[in-house]
Amino acid sequence: MFRPEGMPSLGGIGGLMGKITGNGDGGMSSSMKGFLDCLGKVDSELRKTPGPWFFESSHPMMIDLIFVSHIERMLASSAYWKGLLIRDEARFPGICKWFDAFDERESYLAFKSDFYTNVMDIPPQYGPGFFGGFEDKQDGMAKAIAGTDGKSWKLPLSHDDPLQPLYKGPPLPVCALSAADLDDYKNANSEEMAQACRHAAGWKLASNGVNVSRFAARGGPKGAKNPRKTFQADLADPYANPDDDIRPIVDATLRLVCEMLLLPSNNDARTHEQRLKDEFSNKISDLVTNSEERKGVISSLAYLRDRVGVPRDLPLAAARQLRAHLNWVIDELKSAN
């Protein structure tokens, strides 16, 4: 991930003959081949134990706990920069079983990140990543992770995430699932689960709304003026100031977003998206009345959307709802221009 792959290694005469006869590595770079070989060895060791863990234990040991944070980053960076899904049961069944066992533990949800958060915070820690690898898949995966594919961060959301399985374990804290009568989360009704995830996001937004609106207003035209040193992480700017002129409108808009997320069940045939259109489109256009305000609110909501962190702010199942609803409001404001 952190080196350019360059040209694939021919491996001398033997490697060249492998290309000619079809027994070679298919043009794979030597660094990628070495990475896959290493993963294969790890997978083999995991499959030697009777349970999912590295040692014969009914629970994760220190080696599991140390290793999982590194492999979790590899899941994200391999998909984003190389188009490689490590969590592939056909290729790495031992690693998949190991991650499934972690996912089933509610405690893991408290520190499990998502691909987007990881690929945003990896470069400042490890250096820049380089695109390459399985290039036929890489571009699509990177766009899906970054929410720029036009669907992964847009309503309606898919029930599950194709790159980051949500229901191998509890997608929300167990107490929240029980409160929504979703203890059997693996077989839950998709609409009921979506509502529970929306409510989790809405509750979190409502619980800290004033500070969230102040944070979002950094994205306004007069915000984010940081006189101090810059930071290696592109999205980090702890000393930025909000745009106080646009902040009241941003705050009012986020109250509408919160209201959308906390909508109760409906008793008619309308989809959630239809209800948003029917009940909130006019409220948004009445609230943000001129083009300069619209630009400021759009940039503020985008600033917030791009900085929703997992698990710091929300579990992924709820974070994707918040991102998608922010995008829905952004699209409504753009269509009014």
Image (cartoon, rainbow, N blue to C red):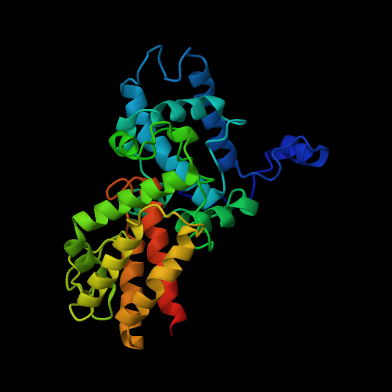
Location of residue 192 with respect to 187 vertically, above or below: below
Does residue 234 appear in the picture of this structure?
no
Instruction: Name the foreground residue: 221 vs 30.
Output: 221
Q: Residue furthest right?
A: 21
Q: Position of residue 56 (x, y in %)?
A: 41, 11
Residue 245 placement (x, y as % from top left): 20, 81
> Quarter-wise, where is residue 179 in the image?
top left
Looking at the picture, how far across and down is residue 304, in whole percent?
31, 64
**Lateral position of residue 7 relative to residue 114, left or right:** right
Nearest the eye: 141 or 313: 313
Q: Residue at x 57, y 35 (%)?
A: 88
Q: Quadrant of the C terminus?
A: bottom left
Instruction: Give the vertical position of 14 relative to 47 (above or below).
Output: below
Identified at 45% across, 72% down, the residue is: 331
Would residue 193 be seen by someone viewing this image from the given angle?
A: yes
Identified at 35% across, 76% down, the residue is 284
Q: Position of residue 286 (x, y in %)?
A: 33, 81
Number of labels in the image equals: 0
Horizontal side of residue 81 vs 69, given as left or right: right
For residue 74, above or below residue 294: above
Judging depth in this view, the residue of 306 and 248 nearest the camera is 248
Q: Residue at x 42, y 44 (%)?
A: 193
